[in-house]
Amino acid sequence: MEQFLPQTIKMVHDLGIINALYVLDSAHDAASNIDLFLAAEEYFLIKHNLRKESLEQWLANARRMGECNSPRPGNTVLRSKSY
């Protein structure tokens, strides 16, 4: 991934694609990958495996570190403050 991600981002840019969304599995949640996407100002989603932690702790972390929006009644979205 260390070489693959920068090459992929470059190829996407070379194709003239803007606002691409990169989707990765939880195995690729290394800080270096996250830093790469943030530095390149790219949209990304990394699946998080919740099997090893409590849902209550995950929700507490999301509320503490993210921004909460309610785009419509009954729908709550927590997202990173980076974008």
Image (cartoon, rainbow, N blue to C red):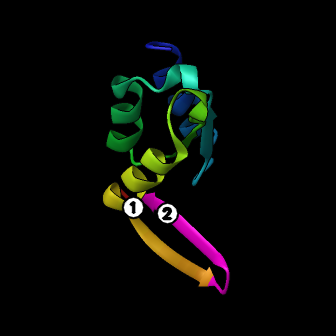
Quadrant in which the C terminus is drawn? bottom left
Is 74 magenta? The answer is: yes
Name which of mark 2 and mark 1 comes first in the sequence. Answer: 1
Q: Quadrant of residue 75?
A: bottom right
Marks 1 and 2: in contact by CB < 8 Å? yes
Q: Residue at x 55, y 19 (%)?
A: 27
Query: Magenta segment, principal secondary structure?
Result: strand
Between 31 and 55, the one nearer to me in the picture: 55
**Whether residue 49 is visible:** no
Q: Position of residue 17 (x, y in %)?
A: 63, 47
* Amino acid type, residue under disc 2 in the picture: Leu
Question: Residue 63: which disc?
Answer: 1
Asked whether residue 61 is in view, the answer is yes
Identity of the amino acid at label 1?
A: Arg
Tell me which segment is drawn in magenta: 72-81
- State the mark number for residue 78: 2
| Callout count | 2
Q: Secondary structure at mark 1?
A: helix
Which residue is depicted at the point 58% across and 29% down?
11
Residue 54 position, x and y percent, is 51, 39
Which is closer to the viewer, label 2 or label 1? 1
| Mark 2 residue crowding within 10 angstroms, few (<14) / some (14–19) / many (20+) | some
Give the residue drawn at x 47%, y 27%: 29
Give the percent coordinates (x, y) of residue 33.
41, 27
29 inside magenta stretch = no
Q: CA distance from mark 2 to mark 1?
A: 7 Å
